[in-house]
Image (spheres, coloured by chain):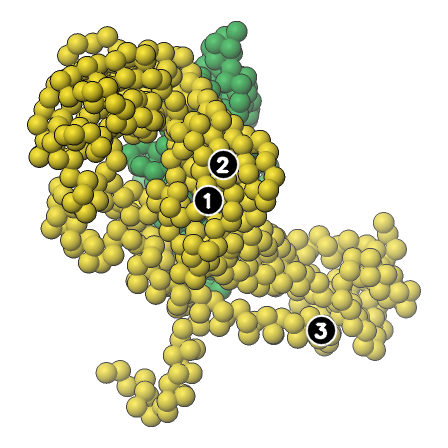
Amino acid sequence: MLTTWAYISNYFVYSAMAVFTISFIAHAFETAFAVRAPEAADSTEGNLLLKTLDYKRTEKSARIATAMMILGFILLLAGIVARGISNGHVPWGNMYEFSITGALAFTGAYLAALRKYDLRWLGLFVSVSVLLTLGTAITLLYRNSAPLVPALKSTWLVIHVLAAIISGGVFLLANVVAGAYLYLDRLESRGPRPGWLQRVPSLEVLDQLSYRLVAFVFPLWTFAVIAGAIWAESAWGRYWGWDPKETWAFITWVAYAAYLHARVTVGWRGRRAAWLCIFAGSTFLFNYVYVNVWGTGKHTYSGL
Amino acid sequence: MSKEIEVPELGFFALIRYAWRQLTSMRTALILLMLMGIAAIPGSLIPQRITNQIAVRDLFSTNPDLAKWYDRFSLFDVYGSPWFSAIYILLFISLIGCVLPRSVEHYKAMRAQPPITPKNLSRLEHHHEFAGDAQSMERASVWFKKNRFRVRKEGNSISAEKGFLRETGNLLFHLSLILILVGVSFGSLLGMRGEAIVSVGERFVNVATSYDSLSFGKLTGEKSLPTFEIKLDKFVGQYDPVTNAPKDYTAWVTIKENGSTYKKVIKVNKPLTFGDTRVYLQANGYSPVVTVRDSQGNVALQGPIPFLPQDGNLRSIGSIKVPDAEPQIGFVSSFVPTNARTTDQGAVSIFPELLDPKLLFSIWKGDLGLDSGIPQSVYRIDTSKLEKVGLGSVKPGETFTYPEGSITLETVVPWINLQIVKDPGKSYALIGGILAVLGLLSSLYGRRRRIWVRITSGGVEVAGLAKNSAPGLEVEIENFVNAIRGEK
């Protein structure tokens, strides 16, 4: 019975991957076909460059892309819920489960931000990263449903891990935005943007957006660290022990604190701020990948 | 030397003031903050004494030169090292130097009236102008009151201000970081931490000699140990039959404290609490209960001997030392809870529960070296001065006989490792943590803004200003304008 739920979960995750692939193709189509040559194509050299952008032509594919992203989110959520039922506990017991939930949080952060900002230009990147994450999870990290080890049996598992995963999703989205900023900044320093990037918001907007995302989620990350400390106190007998995972959570926290100070009180903007943001986000990723896979310490729940 | 720095002309106090101003500047604080992040990195890559003593020892034996250099820079104790301490102490001094003056300033600002309405409102953002009269001003007052703005009425204008919570939260956040640091230092100065292995049926009395390892904070000592006794009645470890991973550990204990006796259950996430001392279930393993007799049949040793687990299936190693036998006898042993029937690999366990337990040993006679004064591991025997007598294995109830005597495996009981921790600072750290999150929330989501309204001959003028150009003022002012125009 419980194994059936594990199979159902896997089917949902596979379906989500298929749907994210459709979303990816629709995003790619949109990006590629919004550009077209002027109607009265004139072959003199200068005029050929005057390509116009016509998003009306691709509006349908853009809508399909977003709709598929939402559907993928729902399917993935269903997969995670089914996994939870098969486990008999929240599905955050090993790295496979962390990864699919992380992909869900990342998609969720994108979809939530999409309600306020037109981020569809990011969709291509988001769908690719989600596909890669899910692909890695299902091929390399997959582990059968298993009961939780005693140390994980706590209400704090839900609170601490959920807060950490959501923070991670938003941090990575901020990283993607900061990365887009740096890329466009380099392009613009050489001349006007190429046509297919016209839609991406101005540098100022990107700069603000990555800051807003970080400022929005930093308290949640602080909470995740504190919730982890409270849990560690009851499970391991100390609330802070410089375990590698704790150390890197602290480094991430310090890096984002530095980022926020640099922006708010020292007035960093643009390139420098974007690099600092990316550095901070990389410490989070490093913590996730390195400490889970190669690291030692007490946070060895990856199941690898 | 740079000419701008006029150090030679500064007096001693001026120099101190100069240094203080440098230290408490935002730039220095930011650099220190980043430095602290970077300084924390080596501790996660190089094994630390506080988390992985064994790996440190291994590095000393495999690569002594490197280990010596690491040690010279305190790289095995990063978080207690002078350089790490220097960074965070400077950071906190800088933080205090920054936050205290700002708190005073903020307190004054909170008590001060909002600034007077600027002369020319049309130059400001969100400027609106429309027809209105004295009633409009009344409605403005009502709106400000309803929305809890602080107001100042001056002639024909009102200036209103809101959003002090932003700076309050900001200061609260930084002050609570200091509280966390105080909690951490309290814990390390006044706390204690120790471990003790207790086999089922045994009793742990909370005095220094009962501990296998025990350390106190600098300002406390053995007298601070509260009196209690824990008897381990039963321990059950449950394992998943498919993955062999642990599912549950539960210890049933009887506690004697202040003359009363009661029963309790300890689990991994449910420690026992005695005031600010807590007792945690930290690890477990098996103790073979053996009886060793000499060649005359006299009992030379009897009791449970804790063995040290080596893998997930609890294959364990241990030593049974019989110093009272003549000659002294030692058993270099392995114990497997579920014996795998392989012939070539020695002792292998295939499941962590006691399904088919077996004790395997080699028997040695001679000088165990217990009187040499050199501390020995309980789990190992130095066989350099011993002579091998034989090899054997027993299952529960069986006896193995060798020329110098015999060994009987009576039964096998589990042992648990109790971790006993006193941390009088943790509640401060917890309160600090909660306040820090609350402070962060109000400082990152709070918006400080001002709204001015003035009645002129032409009508009513409204304008506003948001600090840090926080968004949302435009909508708020629109609502405000609608309210004073009497539109809902």
The dot on residue A242 is none
Give coordinates of residue A88: x percent, y percent. 53, 18
Shade of chain B as shown in the rendered figure: yellow
Tell me the residue at 51%/49% (across/down): B226
Shade of chain A as shown in the rendered figure: green
CB atoms at circles 2 and 1 under 8 Å apart? yes
Distance from Cα at disc 1 to Cα at disc 3: 55 Å
Disc 3 packing (10 Å; few <14; some 14–19; many ≥20): few
Q: Name the residue under label 3.
A: B111
Give coordinates of residue B151: x percent, y percent. 78, 69
Looking at the image, residue B282 lies above or below residue A175: above
The dot on residue B230 is 2
Q: Which amino acid does label 2 sit on?
A: Ile
Upstream in the sequence, badge 3 or badge 2? 3
Q: What element carries label 1?
A: loop
Distance from Cα at disc 3 to Cα at disc 2: 57 Å
Q: What residue type is labelled 3?
A: Arg
Disc 2 packing (10 Å; few <14; some 14–19; many ≥20): many
Give coordinates of residue A271: x percent, y percent. 38, 54
Residue A166 in view, yes or no: no
Upstream in the sequence, badge 2 or badge 1? 1
Tell me the residue at 22%/32% (across/down): B324
Tell me the residue at 74%/57% (across/down): B477
CB atoms at circles 1 and 3 under 8 Å apart? no
